[in-house]
Amino acid sequence: MSQKTILIVDDDPEIRLSLQVRLKANHYGVVFAEDGVTAISEARKHMPHLIILDLGLPAGDGFSVLERLKANLSLSSIPIIVFSARDRNANGERAIKAGAIAFLQKPVDNARLLSVIRNALGEKGESAPVVYDLDRAIH
């Protein structure tokens, strides 16, 4: 089975690093975009299996990126998880209606994040996720 690629769209370098460590520890390939314009470009370039999308982005907020991805025929089938610090009640339903498969509010624990990713990728029968403590790795 080939490694699945996940596009992380977030302008915060610490969030990108944290997600990268978690995902690579669980055998996913990772590519990044720091803003809305780059997100569309990187999605076209890499055709990832899944996109993790923040809502608060420079050069196009997450909702406009979500709508553009879902409107593009070659990208519309890629599952998108919205991963945001914004209020779930105000933004969760809007994200799902715009085409996201899940809304996760930051911070989210590793097991929950990996469970949602595996379900989105149809990997329900996979082994337990590797839990990697980024704080311990840095200190």
Image (cartoon, rainbow, N blue to C red):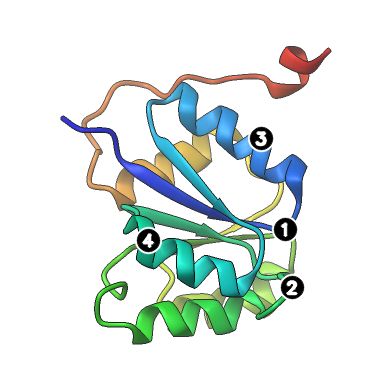
Q: Are marks 3 and 4 in contact (CB under 8 Å)?
A: no
Q: Is residue 71 left or right of residue 54?
A: left
Number of other residues with Cα within 10 Å of mark 3, as a class: few under 14, some 14 to 19, many 20 or more? some
Number of other residues with Cα within 10 Å of mark 2, as a class: few under 14, some 14 to 19, many 20 or more? few
Q: Are marks 1 and 2 in contact (CB under 8 Å)?
A: yes
Looking at the picture, how far across and down is residue 120, in whole percent?
32, 52
Q: Residue furthest left?
A: 1
- Disc assigned to residue 11: 1
Looking at the picture, how far across and down is residue 91, in whole percent?
64, 77
Q: Nearer the viewer, residue 13 or 82?
A: 13
**Number of numbered discs visible in the structure rendering:** 4
Q: Earlier in the sequence, mark 1 or mark 2?
A: 1
Q: Earlier in the sequence, mark 3 or mark 4?
A: 3
- Amino acid at circle 2: Pro
Q: Which residue is mark 2?
A: 58
Q: Which residue is mark 3?
A: 18
For the point 67% across and 36% down, the residue is: 17
Which element is circle 3 on? Answer: helix
Q: Nearer the viewer, residue 42 or 97?
A: 42
Number of other residues with Cα within 10 Å of mark 4, as a class: few under 14, some 14 to 19, many 20 or more? few
Measure the alpha-carbon separation of dots 2 and 4: 20 Å
For the point 55% across and 51% down, the residue is: 32
